[in-house]
């Protein structure tokens, strides 16, 4: 998927209505308290109960001091995940079915006595509007889940990037059903790991970040050329 971040593939969709002042700042609706939390570097997590599903839809918002392009470039480089994402043991790209689409195999370390989770995710890169990026993923049936799908939306806000990470998992194992609380904790940790990785690469002015941005642009350009033909 890319990312069904190591917690068995999680995520969420967040809708919050209130402050028009927040709407002008972030491009979505947040209460004044939520806006202050985002500006102070805190994460916002929302759990949306889904009828018939033992796990809720998890939603994470966070503000990062970097451009949407930089954050998208780091996230798009899924092969780097094992170096900074908790419980991610390996990622292997299987193929590029089309420009802006990657199919990759992920191996995640499971808690307690459970065998590792292995799944294949189809990840797609799009740009809904200028300077805004969305990476969507879909995972079909695996050892522990029936299916999972979600996306990460990266849009400009306050001179940085507002992350909206959303993913819904339908667990297919009785063991997975017991991990709801842990899943909610891990999804926060994984979004935090992404922002830390971005900040670390920025601090080093690394060649790695430049290479990641170049690869992101190539994927976008190839995708655009394909559609125009």
Image (cartoon, rainbow, N blue to C red):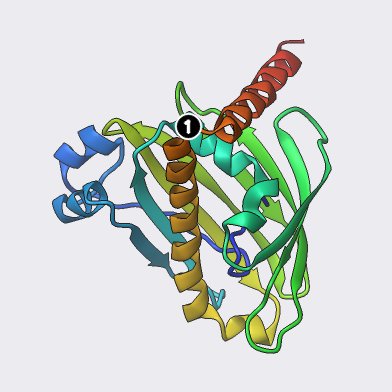
Q: Is residue 225 above or below residue 63?
A: above
Left or right, 205 with reference to 207:
left
User: Which secondary structure, mark 1?
Assistant: loop
Q: Is residue 174 above or below residue 47?
A: below
Q: Is residue 216 above or below residue 84?
A: above
Residue 108 rendering spot, x and y as whole percentages = 69, 68
Observer-nearest of 176 and 49: 176
Q: Which residue is mark 1?
A: 205
Residue 169 rendering spot, x and y as whole percentages = 60, 66
The residue at the point 66 percent across, 18 percent down is 221
Residue 163 rendering spot, x and y as whole percentages = 41, 45
The residue at the point 47 percent across, 80 percent down is 181
The answer to whether one can see residue 3 in this image is: no
Q: Is residue 119 above or below residue 161?
A: below
The residue at the point 69 percent across, 44 percent down is 123
Left or right, 20 with reference to 54:
left
The answer to whether one can see residue 139 in this image is: yes
Observer-nearest of 136 and 51: 136
Observer-nearest of 55 and 205: 205
**Which of the 4 quarters of the picture holds residue 126?**
top right
């Amino acid at each position: 998927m890319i990312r069904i971040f190591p917690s068995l593939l999680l995520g969420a969709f967040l809708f919050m209505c209130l402050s028009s002042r927040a709407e002008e700042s972030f491009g979505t609706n947040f209460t004044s308290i939520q806006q202050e939390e985002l500006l102070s570097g805190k994460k916002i997590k929302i759990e949306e109960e889904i009828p018939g599903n033992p796990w809720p839809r998890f939603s994470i918002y966070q503000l990062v001091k970097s451009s949407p392009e930089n954050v998208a470039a780091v996230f798009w480089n899924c092969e780097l995940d094992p170096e900074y994402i908790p419980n991610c043991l390996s990622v292997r790209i299987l193929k590029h079915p089309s420009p802006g689409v990657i199919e990759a195999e992920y191996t995640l370390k499971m808690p307690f006595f459970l065998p590792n989770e292995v799944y294949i995710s189809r990840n797609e890169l799009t740009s809904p509007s200028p300077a805004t990026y969305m990476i969507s993923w879909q995972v079909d049936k695996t050892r522990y889940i029936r299916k999972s799908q979600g996306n990460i939306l990266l849009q400009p806000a306050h001179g940085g990037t507002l992350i909206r990470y959303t993913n819904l998992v339908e667990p297919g194992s009785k063991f997975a059903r017991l991990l709801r609380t842990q899943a909610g904790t891990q999804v926060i940790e994984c979004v935090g790991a992404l922002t830390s990785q971005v900040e670390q690469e920025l601090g080093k002015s690394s060649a790695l970040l430049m290479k990641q941005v170049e690869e992101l642009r190539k994927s976008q350009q190839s995708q655009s050329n394909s559609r125009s033909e």
